[in-house]
Image (cartoon, rainbow, N blue to C red):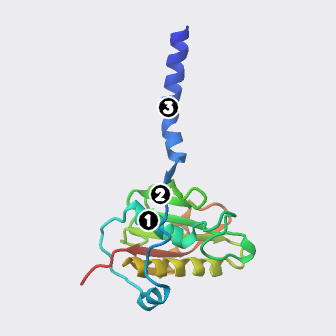
Amino acid sequence: MRCLTSSLLALSLLLAAPALAQDAVHKLPAPDTRGGMPLMQALAERHTTRAFSPAALDDATIGNLLWAAWGQNRPDGKRTAPSARNKQNLKLYVNKQDGLWLYDAAAHGLSRVADALGRPLDDAPVVLIFAVPDDDRYGNMHVGSVYQNVGLFCASAGLGNVVKASTTRDAALFSFLPKGWHAAATQSVGLPLRQ
């Protein structure tokens, strides 16, 4: 009887393993908060890039990118970008070749949401999706603050980026969003394609 119980327990853990793995947070390396170029130089070098190398970005770069965008920079949970009344009503999704992920600033990690959305968004190796509640009148302002942080980080790190609102027109593409939320903009990020 004891052997049967152990076997059933092992089988139940094995069957539950994929569900547990799906909910696990993929921890990113700690952000390098001392690196980068001076702010005025990053402002001078910030520009839009529309052609990207297909080369994937490593976890350290993605971690720095997401922390710069919407990371926690104080012990009280406040962020690198401001939000009205500190409501922090913004979800930052990351679409890359290995899937669609949600950034968890408290854990500085990614939670897998679904398979990658693919080319309907862009052919950049990373596409950020900024989602806000439908009824948040400050939502677009928050998105602007976050994508400006991304643009400055990209200038500092030698990455290209482009912000697009046109990619959010097809609501069906964003059916993964919670009810009452919409995609306000996307931002493609990657190494610029040298022409």
Mark number displayed over residue 15: 3
Quadrant of the image occupied by residue 83: bottom right
First along the sequence among labels 3 and 2:
3
Between the residue at mark 3 and the residue at mark 2, the CA separation in whole angstroms equals: 27 Å
> Which secondary structure, mark 2?
loop
Which residue sits at x=59%, y=80%?
Answer: 145
> Which secondary structure, mark 3?
helix
Which residue sits at x=44%, y=73%?
Answer: 35
Q: Which amino acid does label 2 sit on?
A: Leu
> Image quadrant for the C terminus?
bottom left
Give the number of the mark in front: 3 or 2.
2
Residue 62: x %, y % from top left: 44, 65
Quadrant of the image occupied by residue 48: bottom left
Give the number of the mark in front: 3 or 1.
1
Which residue sits at x=54%, y=59%?
Answer: 108
First along the sequence among labels 1 and 2:
2
Residue 161 in sight: no
Which residue sits at x=66%, y=63%?
Answer: 75
Residue 32 as seen in the image, left or right of residue 80: left
Residue 137 as seen in the image, left or right of residue 184: right
Q: What residue type is labelled 1?
A: Ile
Residue at the farthest left position: 195
Quadrant of the image occupied by residue 190: bottom left
Which residue is denoted by mark 2 in the rendering? 28
